[in-house]
Amino acid sequence: MKTDLGMPQRIYAVRKTLGLTQKDFAERLNISKAYAGAIELNKRKINDRIIKIICFTYNVNEQWLRTGIGAMFNESDDHKLEEVIRNFKKLDALLQDYVLKQIHLALEYQETKDKE
C-alpha cells in the first residue's frame, strides 16, 4: 500500500502514531527539538543518517519512510524490546542489577494478579 505523503509528513505520522512529542521524538534520535520540527515542516533536508536512525530507533520500515510503500513499521521486530535492550546497555552494572530486580518484582506481581 502506498501513501501519498511526503517524507516529512511520514515522519510526523510516525511520531504521532507513537504518541510522542517532538521533544521526546528528537531526544531519542539525539537531535534537537528544533531540528525535528524543521524536518517535519520540510525546512531541513532529511539525510540518510537521520533516516537510518529513525528506522532503527522506532522500528520504522525504511522503504515506507522513503517511498510510502508498505507498512509503517517492521512487523517482525519488537521495537519496545529493542529500546529496552539499548537503554539497559547504557546503565552501569549497579543500575542494571536494580532494573533486573524491578523486572522480577513486576513479574511476581503479574503472576499473583493473574491467579486472582
Image (cartoon, rainbow, N blue to C red):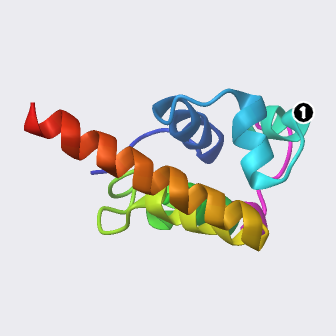
Left-right relation of 91 to 100: right
Compared with 78, 28 (above or below) is: above
**Residue at x 78%, y 31% (from the top left corner):** 23
What x and y, as percent, mark residue 99?
59, 56
**Residue at x 72%, y 60% (from the top left corner):** 95
- Closer to the camera, 85 or 49? 85
Q: Is residue 113 found inside the magenta-colored segment of the image?
A: no
Question: Mark 1 Cα within 10 Å, few/some/many (few <14, many 20+)?
Answer: few
- Closer to the camera, 45 or 93? 93
- Closer to the camera, 70 or 36? 36
**Residue at x 83%, y 52% (from the top left corner):** 45
Q: Using the rendered image of the protein, determine whether residue 85 is visible from the camera's viewpoint.
A: yes
**Residue at x 31%, y 40% (from the top left corner):** 109
The magenta segment is 41-51
Magenta stretch mostly in which secondary structure?
loop
Residue identifier under label 1: 34
Q: Using the rendered image of the protein, determine whether residue 41 is visible from the camera's viewpoint.
A: no
**In which quadrant of the rendered image does the C terminus lie?**
top left
